[in-house]
Amino acid sequence: MLKRVHFPRSVLPYLLVAPQILITLVFFIWPASQAVYQSFLIEDAFGLSTEFVWFENFELLVDDELYLQSFGRTIFFSAAVALLSMSAALVLAGFADRVVRGATTYRTLMIWPYAVAPVLAGALWVFMFNPTLGIFPFLLDMVGIDWNHYLNGTHAMMLVIFAAAWKQIAYNFLFYLAAMQSIPRSLIEAAAIDGAGPVRRFIDHIFPLISPTTFFLLVINAVYAFFDTFGIIHAVTQGGPANSTTILVYKVFNDGFVGLDLGGSAAQSVILMVLVIAMTVVQFRYIERKVEY
Amino acid sequence: MASITLKDLVKAYGDTEVLHHVEGEISDGEFIVVVGPSGCGKSTLLRMVAGLETVTSGTIRIGDKVVNQLEPADRDIAMVFQNYALYPHMSVRENMAYGLKIRKISKDEIARRVEEAADILELRPYLDRKPRQLSGGQRQRVAMGRAIVRNPQVFLFDEPLSNLDAKLRVQMRLEIRKLQQRLGVTSIYVTHDQVEAMTLGDRLMVLNGGYVEQFGTPIELYDRPATTFVAGFIGSPAMNFLPATVSAGMATLGNGAQLANAGAANGAVTLGVRPEHLLQDDAGPVRVTVELVEQLGANSLLHGKLEGTDIEMVVSQPGHMSAAAGTVMGFAPAAGALHLFHAETGKRIEP
């Protein structure tokens, strides 16, 4: 029988984890609990009186047409961002995996967009797509497309999707490239000898073998599109025109800090919190287990 | 089925030449083993034939086609990799069928060929398993199966047995040989194991540092090694090398002992004699100070030094024998068993 090893009790381990716990408490647990508490309150617009109303804020949201629309829009937005940035990253990583000359330069350039702050990324796209000044509307005009994301909701949505996806490509690219490089070379060589060309090898072997990475990135990208795209939307469209790019996280900000409905905004953020917890659970519980090698 | 011709084949990475002007004719149905120490370029040579490495200069011909510029897929070859390179996400059946599926062969034909190969390799019960559910020997068999279902012109083996345990290796070695004889497919087999090389190959190509040292049948290599490298590499335990000077058919060893029948050479030579070709003879000229005796049952290996020198020697004697450390024993080389090599170049001097 194994003997358990006992170490003398000491305060050192507690001291060592204390900073991390403190940060978690101050910056995560406390604001989260405040949000939960606030979501049970209704406050008048001047902040003079507050009433504890239990779940009324949530009931209001469920019946709110605008909120439900925003919900659907967010799901579309994050699916589009994940799909676009992951497929672009996959193709680029597929090429990077085959590049021989200048591979390091190519990879370094690929990673740059990730270092750009979301607001700056947004600003970049705003300039490029500005209906009067931008280069893209000018080019699109030549093929007969009248681009104006200030007036056209579809254009606005496309623009934020492009901007958000573009920024995430670098991240996805890194993971895909690492996954591809962990596939044994001889496996791909065996497929080449079996007669599979580069495209066939990619579809039949590389893609199935990196599927664990794909699942992982899917969750990460969904979370990114749900939460981290606030900066881009704020810089590019500010949720407009006519709410056409107001995704949930932007609506939290808009209702809370612009509309001053703190209770309703808090209720929305609690719902978002539950969503991200659910996604994380899915990630750990189901997807990590399905990894096949 | 096809012959393979290697002509003036060179491989260089940048300025570093790793294979130097390799020449070789491999006839249809022959089993060629390329053998040498690690880093000698043998795998590179195989990968060039497979089309996985580019050819710097020279030509490779399979059949009557120059294949230098052909993709691996178009060379009609099959390769068995050291780590098997099975597709982990496919069942054994799919692994074997993959190459056929790509070549757009009909489903019935694929099923027939896969099952035939599975019968030959006794893989039938495992057809629906994934590679990770198989043992090392079974994976090895699947890799073989994947090669034979394709019915290619050439088999290429890249140290296929080095990941197996000793017993399985001997067993698989026999199976590969039997299979190749049955199918009659031209094969190139790369290994660093000289026993594997001797037992498998119709002919052996011994590579050292990117040069072909000798290309011949196992017996030729054993009886008439072209260089000291081949002489030391082929045969176990390795050949004894004794520096000597030759004049008028008599070789004088470092300790003054003299051996007759030294042939036509003259001057400084390296004299080679295999451990099993030294016969016990109390009056024999080769006197060995015994250090240790290894009893192997069928024979005994005497390790020691040439009397009065620091030259290590091994002598193999049939049956059991024992000798205390420090005993000096006399041996005489069997008739015609002396090999003479040039002292500097290591090249064989024909008697």
Image (cartoon, helix red, strand yellow):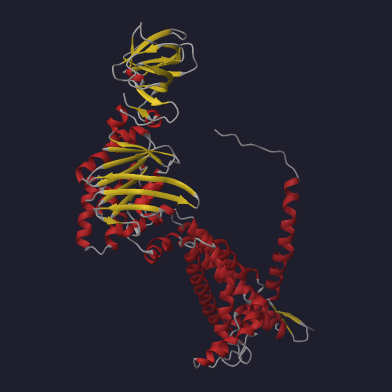
Frontmost residue, A90 versus B289: B289
Q: Residue most toward the right? A: A48
Depicted A152 relative to depicted A5: above or below? below
Please give left or right for residue A185 compared with residue B281 in the image.
Answer: right
Q: Nearer the viewer, residue B299 or B105?
A: B299
Residue B228 lies in quadrant: top left
Up the image or down, A264 lies above or below B3; here it is below
Number of marks: 0
Q: Viewer-proximal residue, A9 or B270?
A: B270
Q: Position of residue A29 (x, y in %)?
A: 70, 65
Tell me which corner region of the image, top left, top right, bottom left or bottom right, holds residue B68. Answer: bottom left
| Residue B128 visible in the current orientation | no
Taking the spot 72% from the left edge, 38% from the top edge, the residue there is A8
Q: Where A77 falls versus B119 (above or below)?
A: below
Q: Quadrant of the C terminus of chain B?
A: top left
Percent across and percent down for residue B294 are 40, 17
Answer with the quarter of the image where residue A198 lies: bottom left
Question: Which percent across, then down, holds residue A152?
Answer: 56, 91
Q: Residue at x 68, y 80 (%)?
A: A253
- Give the vertical position of B35 relative to A293 (above or below): above
